[in-house]
Image: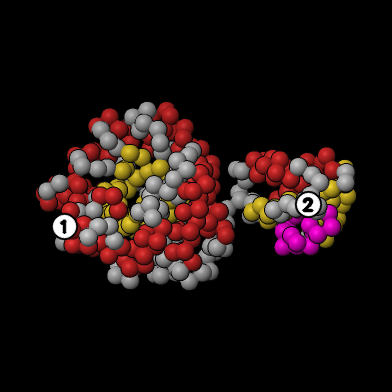
């Protein structure tokens, strides 16, 4: 689906074959949690991420074995791969030479200027962009002292400092992230940086937490920024299967009508009129459609009286009660059937809808 919301126009870079910034589609990223040196496990997880719709994947490169594994991983996946490197510039260079499509570093912890220069020269040689990743938990001591702790202003100053170091080396294939576990601080930092640079921005709330708290923090932080036209790519950080990060990322984009992938499921919150196992039915429908890329709006309602009307914007939907199930399209009832066939009938209708497109 074409994006129609107003966005701040940023410079465009390429991560492999995926454009980031410059009005391109907002990409959804994730990061593996396998040992990168375990090529089989890492490839298997990336393939699950690809199935979930992940556009770009990042892997940790903490040692030489992991850097060497990049080439074997790349040969078995179909999406761009970013190497995440800290402290050792030699690992960054090794990962790029092994075929990484992008690099995530904090120039401040790579070391002396000559080490940063060596990384930049290698990135330039291989046509690889660098993400300057600023994290609230690792700001420079002088910035912490200047701002009396972690502040949005300090995070932005750190980012601009690192950006200028790269630009001084005539390197401009840069994107930037400013991440904190605090939503307000994260949003304020991105707003400020967006007013100070035209570089593409990678959105995220770091250390967002477990499933529920992480989804809430990410939806608020990332969603607020996207609604304001800020952001070119995103990652939802969850202490969970990385595929869940991708699904949540697409749900955020879908909720803002920015980008659609797969079905949107509408379900009522239930009330005293509900006489079916709505929770179980919704879970079965969600699981059945989890890997579908069909852009369809599906309603699962617990009341045959109000359900069709309340979900009239849905392409297809079901409601049930008192032993009777109904199927509706755009709010109009088209079929009645036994209540125990609710999921079966709905999935058949989704399949029919897909074939009719």
| Lateral position of residue 124 relative to residue 276, left or right | left
Task: Give the total number of marks visible in the rendering.
Answer: 2
Q: State the image quarter where residue 81 is shown.
A: top left
Q: Which residue is drawn at 48% across and 71% down?
A: 6
Camera-side residue of 354 and 241: 241
Q: What element carries label 2?
A: loop
- Give the labeled residue for mark 2: 272
| Lateral position of residue 105 relative to residue 346, left or right | left
Q: Residue at x 37, y 28 (%)?
A: 38
Q: Residue 217, how many percent across, how many down?
A: 46, 54
Camera-side residue of 320 and 107: 320
Q: Give the range drawn in magenta.
A: 304-317
State which mark lies toward you, 1 or 2: 2
- Give the labeled residue for mark 1: 142
Q: How crowded is mark 2: few (under 14 residues within 10 Å), some or many (20 or more)?
A: few
Q: State the image quarter where residue 12 is shown.
A: bottom left
Camera-side residue of 121 and 175: 175
Q: Could you tell which of marks 1 and 2 lies nearer the N-terminus?
A: 1
Does the image show residue 173?
A: no
Depicted 15 relative to depicted 288: above or below: below
């Amino acid at each position: 689906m074409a994006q129609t919301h107003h966005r701040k126009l940023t410079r465009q870079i390429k991560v492999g074959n995926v454009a980031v910034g410059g009005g391109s589609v907002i990409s959804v990223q994730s990061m593996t949690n396998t040992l990168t040196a375990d090529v089989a496990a890492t490839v298997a997880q990336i393939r699950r991420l690809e199935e979930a719709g992940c556009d770009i994947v990042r892997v940790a490169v903490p040692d030489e074995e992991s850097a060497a594994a990049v080439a074997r991983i790349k040969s078995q996946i179909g999406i761009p791969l970013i190497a995440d490197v800290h402290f050792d510039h030699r690992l960054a260079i090794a990962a790029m030479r092994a075929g990484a499509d992008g690099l995530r570093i904090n120039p401040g912890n790579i070391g002396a200027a000559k080490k940063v220069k060596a990384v930049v020269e290698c990135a330039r040689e291989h046509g690889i962009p660098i993400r300057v990743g600023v994290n609230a938990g690792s700001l420079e001591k002088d910035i912490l002292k200047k701002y009396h702790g972690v502040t949005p202003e300090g995070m932005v100053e750190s980012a601009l400092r690192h950006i200028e170091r790269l630009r001084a080396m005539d390197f401009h294939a840069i994107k930037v992230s400013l991440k904190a576990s605090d939503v307000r601080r994260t949003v304020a930092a991105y707003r400020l940086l967006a007013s100070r640079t035209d570089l593409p921005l990678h959105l995220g709330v770091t250390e967002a937490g477990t499933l529920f708290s992480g989804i809430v923090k990410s939806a608020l932080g990332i969603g607020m920024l996207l609604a304001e036209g800020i952001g070119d790519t995103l990652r939802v950080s969850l202490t969970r299967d990385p595929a869940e990060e991708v699904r949540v990322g697409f749900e955020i984009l879908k909720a803002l009508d920015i980008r659609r992938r797969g079905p949107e499921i509408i379900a009522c919150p239930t009330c005293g009129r509900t006489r079916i196992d709505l929770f179980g039915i919704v879970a079965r429908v969600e699981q059945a459609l989890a890997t579908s890329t069909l852009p369809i709006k599906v309603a699962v309602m617990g009341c045959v009286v109000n359900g069709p009307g309340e979900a009239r914007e849905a392409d297809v939907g079901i409601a049930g009660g008192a032993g009777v199930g109904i199927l509706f399209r755009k709010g109009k009832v088209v079929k009645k059937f036994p209540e125990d066939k609710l999921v079966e009938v709905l999935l058949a209708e989704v399949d029919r809808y897909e074939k009719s497109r």
